[in-house]
């Protein structure tokens, strides 16, 4: 397969591929080599205006809304078919601009396609309710779309995250302006290409790339946007919520996490070690739902640290294109930040039993790192690292383990390892997290609702629940008689 990709990528607005209004571009880097890879048109406020106007025109035309929902679903199946056909091309783009392996990139493409089939299949199943008010009335509810949905996507899984919100918006007849992440935008353009090939109405889906402070800020504060879906950091989420408050816009907030798995004495240790590795080293730890803390019984700490260190040291670190286990982090800035957090943890008394910072090679690589001797209050155990760095914390009593797991500002995911179902149920019920994994980190899929508690945000993506974020209930109450119990003319 050729390893060449297009050198210049345009924005997709109103059914056309276009340059930025002012002709500006952003240079995209390959994180595995730290070299320039391609350029993308850099959208600014004028491009946002144009995209929002196109989305508004399409929404007001009611073309999507008036379609029989089953036909809207069929259109989404077509989008999925085109995404699947382009899966190898997508995999290469995702590998080169994001750092993933080719297999990881292809999985992204196929998962993105599945979002369109999953939500396409639900397009004709979102129903209103008939509410009995006696013989003189007919009363019913309509799940109504909001209008123009502004969607902002982070760089760690840009394609899947974009696909999940675009698919929900189309299934519910909203129109979309999506800003892709400036560090890794290429794969999201394939959603636009698939929509174009499938014959999605012009203006229904617009995808542009620009910087957050410029393009992103213009989009979320635009006067003609009706709804915001944001996935990214807590800090940016708070900024967007302040902008949304001005216009009382509904928002879905998918923010960060500092998720913990609790190990019980009866756990299957192979399962714990494999799950811990998958939970923190997948995508070089750049996963909002990463298992970045492992809470273990005090008297098992030494054994677990030994096994985790052996696992971490067995992993290969290098470019995704060669199928390595630990692929690069997205940028020099991220690598610097992670390295500094590791250095500060060591300074604070944590002990790196594997790794401990930047890997000694070209590109933005961090060694798979395991910290022992971590106390729950240390910064490394409280703040999101967003890299391949696991903190192991110890407990003596179950209540203490639960309080450690719940003891951060975040509440995205949590997990536990035990063979005892009563313990699993009791503990799961007490964990402050939107998703709890038992005996396998990341157990779940597109069908299972995902989202945060506390400062990890609100609203749910994935699963049937997600569609409820994209509609508002309208109630229609009709007086059908002049009185008289519903007799015609009565
Ligand atoms: P980020 O908040 O820096 O950027 C996310 C997006 O917001 C980017 O597209 C960026 O351009 C844009 N942005 C930045 N400033 C903006 C502004 N002022 N106005 C509007 N848009 C702006 O986050 P990131 O570093 O790209 O991603 C990592 C974060 O995302 C982590 O905290 C991670 O946990 C979180 N995340 C959450 C989920 C989830 O589903 N909960 C999934 C993936 C990532």
Image: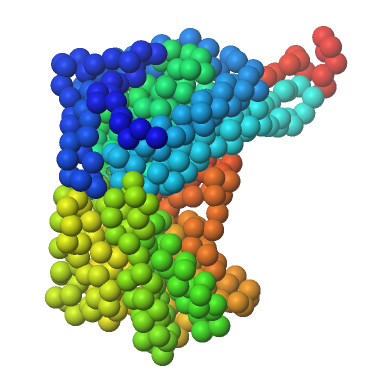
Using the image, determine if residue 218 lies above or below residue 290: above
Using the image, determine if residue 422 lies above or below residue 278: below
Q: Name which quarter of the figure residue 482 lies in.
A: top right
Residue at x 55%, y 83% (from the top left corner): 266
User: Where is residue 100 drawn, in percent x and y?
Assistant: 35, 47
Residue 218 seen in this snapshot: no
Residue at x 51%, y 14% (from the top left corner): 199
Q: As drawn, which residue projects farthest toward the right?
A: 487
Answer left or right for 487 relative to 322: right
Answer left or right for 238 relative to 127: left
User: Where is residue 57 drawn, in percent x and y?
Assistant: 41, 11
- Colour theme: rainbow
Of residues 232 and 227, the one drawn nearer to the viewer in this rendering: 232
Using the image, determine if residue 68 lies above or below residue 188: above
Of residues 224 and 111, the one drawn nearer to the viewer in this rendering: 111
Q: As drawn, which residue projects farthest toward the bottom?
A: 299
Residue at x 47%, y 21% (from the top left corner): 195
User: Where is residue 62 drawn, in percent x and y?
Assistant: 52, 13
Question: Which quarter of the figure is the C terminus placed in?
Answer: top right
Specify the quarter for ligand 1.
top left
Residue at x 28%, y 15% (from the top left corner): 18
Using the image, determine if residue 162 lies above or below residue 7: below
User: Where is residue 16 drawn, in percent x and y?
Assistant: 36, 13
The total of numbered circles placed on residues is: 0
Question: Which quarter of the figure is the N terminus placed in?
Answer: top left
Residue 88 seen in this snapshot: yes
Of residues 449 and 317, the one drawn nearer to the viewer in this rendering: 317
């Amino acid at each position: 397969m050729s390893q060449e990709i297009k050198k210049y990528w345009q924005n997709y607005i109103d059914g056309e591929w276009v340059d930025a209004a002012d002709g500006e571009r952003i240079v995209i880097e390959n994180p595995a080599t730290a070299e320039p890879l391609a350029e993308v048109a850099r959208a600014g406020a004028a491009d946002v205006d144009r995209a929002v106007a196109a989305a508004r025109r399409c929404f007001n035309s009611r073309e999507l809304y008036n379609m029989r929902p089953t036909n809207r679903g069929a259109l989404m199946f077509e989008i999925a078919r085109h995404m699947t056909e382009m899966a190898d091309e997508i995999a290469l783009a995702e590998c080169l601009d994001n750092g993933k392996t080719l297999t990881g990139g292809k999985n992204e493409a196929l998962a993105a396609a599945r979002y369109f089939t999953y939500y396409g299949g639900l397009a004709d199943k979102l129903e209103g309710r008939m509410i009995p008010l006696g013989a003189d009335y007919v009363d019913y509810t309509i799940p109504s779309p909001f209008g123009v949905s502004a969607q902002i996507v982070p760089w760690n899984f840009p394609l899947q995250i974009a696909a999940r919100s675009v698919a929900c918006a189309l299934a519910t007849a909203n129109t979309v302006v999506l800003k892709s992440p400036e560090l890794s935008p290429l794969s999201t353009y394939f959603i636009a290409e698939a929509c174009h090939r499938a014959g999605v109405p012009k203006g229904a889906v617009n995808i542009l790339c620009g910087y957050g402070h410029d393009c992103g800020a213009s989009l979320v504060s635009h006067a003609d946007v009706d709804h915001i879906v944001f996935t990214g950091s807590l800090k940016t989420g708070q900024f967007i919520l302040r902008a949304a408050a001005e216009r009382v816009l509904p928002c879905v907030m998918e923010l960060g996490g500092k998720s913990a798995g609790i190990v019980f004495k009866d756990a299957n240790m192979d399962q714990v070690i494999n799950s811990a590795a998958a939970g923190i080293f997948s995508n070089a730890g750049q996963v909002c739902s990463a298992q970045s803390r492992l809470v273990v019984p005090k008297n098992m700490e030494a054994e677990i640290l030994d096994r985790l260190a052996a696992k971490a040291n067995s992993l290969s670190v290098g470019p995704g294109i060669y199928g390595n286990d630990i692929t690069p982090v997205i940028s020099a800035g991220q690598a610097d930040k992670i390295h500094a957090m590791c250095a500060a943890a060591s300074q604070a008394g944590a002990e790196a039993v594997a790794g401990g910072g930047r890997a000694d090679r070209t590109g933005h690589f961090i060694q798979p790192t395991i910290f022992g001797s971590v106390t729950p209050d240390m910064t490394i155990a409280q703040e999101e690292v967003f890299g391949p760095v696991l903190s192991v914390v110890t407990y003596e009593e179950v209540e203490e383990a639960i309080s450690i797991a719940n003891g951060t500002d975040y509440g995205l995911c949590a997990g536990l390892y035990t063979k005892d179902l009563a313990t699993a149920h009791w503990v799961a019920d007490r964990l402050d997290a939107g998703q709890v994994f038992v005996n396998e980190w990341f157990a779940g899929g597109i069908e299972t609702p995902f989202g945060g508690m506390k400062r990890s945000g609100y609203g749910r993506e994935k699963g049937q629940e997600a569609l409820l974020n994209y509609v508002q209930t309208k109630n229609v109450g009709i007086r059908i008689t002049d009185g008289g119990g519903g007799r015609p003319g009565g």
